[in-house]
Image (cartoon, rainbow, N blue to C red):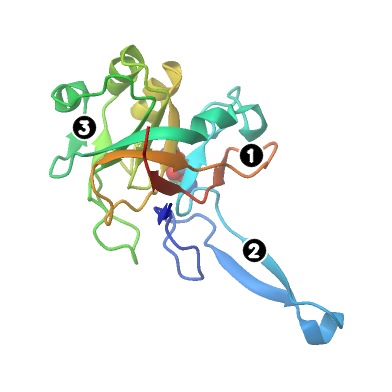
């Protein structure tokens, strides 16, 4: 069945965190130079585009990518629309049916111009950690660069989610996807010591 790409493109000029390493790709060794092949080289911040955070990103003693449970990044996921709010907490999700959901994707539609890094986004409140854990949710995905406000230093949502064993997927593009049930695939690269990883995130319409 057809895959729906929910990743943001990575190209020179892709917006990234102010002051962070921009995405840059070049052919560093051309076919003419090597005599056989074009060889590319890239530099980027891990938190550019669609990516997962590992706990080491915000906790020096936290798990790195090599320690993550891959199972969480593949499997049934529910996409819900929570747009039009400045932040999302437990009370905003109370009316949604989340029974049996392990992976929850939130469409906030608050990153309005994909060609620029946003100045304000819908962020998550820390009370989502216990709320989501109580419902059995293990992974949360958002369509913005962070689950916290962009200028946050405490990162209450990152810590609150992590404390309740909820994994974080950020920078999705959900504009073209309808709310509903899907199979999610968003595997991190085997970047052993890293604080996160870019992912190619796709959805497949879910047939139980
Ligand atoms: N790359 C950065 C540079 C500076 C300040 C924050 C970030 C972040 O990545 C924070 C965000 N919580 C993130 O996980 O994407
Ligand atoms: Zn991140
Ligand atoms: Zn993050």
- Marks 2 and 1 close (CB-CB < 8 Å): no
Is 39 left or right of 178, judged from the image as shown?
right
Q: Report helix, strand or loop for mark 1.
A: loop
**Whether residue 153 is visible:** no
Quadrant assignment, res 194: top right
Question: Residue 42's mark?
Answer: 2
Q: Report helix, strand or loop for mark 2.
A: strand
Marked residue nearer the N-terminal end (3 or 2): 2
Q: Is the CB of mark 1 within 8 Å of ligand 2?
A: no
Mark 3, other Cα within 10 Å: few <14 / some 14–19 / many ≥20:
many
Question: Residue 88's mark?
Answer: 3
- 138 and 4: which is toward the camera: 4
Q: Residue at x 26, y 27 (%)?
A: 125
4 shown above or below 206:
below
Q: Which residue is mark 1?
A: 194
- 170 and 78: which is toward the camera: 78
Distance of mark 3 from mark 2, alpha carbons?
A: 35 Å
- 194 and 106: which is toward the camera: 106
Q: Residue at x 38, y 49 (%)?
A: 172
The percent coordinates of residue 155 (x first, y second) are 38, 31
Question: Residue 102's mark?
Answer: none
Q: Residue at x 45, y 63 (%)?
A: 9
Quadrant assignment, res 131: top left
């Amino acid at each position: 069945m057809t895959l729906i790409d929910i990743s943001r493109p990575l190209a020179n000029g892709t917006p990234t965190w102010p002051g962070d390493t921009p995405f840059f790709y070049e052919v560093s060794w051309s076919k003419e130079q090597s005599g056989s092949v074009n060889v590319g080289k890239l530099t980027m911040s891990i938190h550019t585009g669609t990516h997962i955070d590992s706990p080491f990103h915000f906790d020096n003693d936290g798990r790195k990518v090599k320690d993550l449970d891959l199972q969480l990044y593949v499997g049934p996921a529910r996409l819900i629309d929570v747009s039009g709010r400045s932040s999302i907490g437990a009370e905003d999700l109370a009316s949604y049916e989340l029974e049996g959901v392990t992976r929850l994707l939130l469409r906030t539609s608050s990153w309005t111009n994909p060609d620029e890094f946003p100045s304000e986004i819908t962020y998550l409140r820390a009370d989502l950690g216990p709320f989501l854990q109580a419902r059995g949710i293990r992974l949360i995905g958002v369509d913005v660069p962070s689950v916290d406000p962009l200028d946050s230093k405490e990162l209450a949502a990152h810590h609150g989610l992590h404390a309740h064993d909820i994994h974080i997927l950020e920078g999705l593009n959900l504009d073209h996807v309808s709310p509903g049930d899907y199979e999610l695939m968003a595997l991190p690269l085997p970047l052993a010591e890293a604080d996160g990883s870019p992912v190619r995130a796709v959805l497949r319409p879910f047939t139980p």
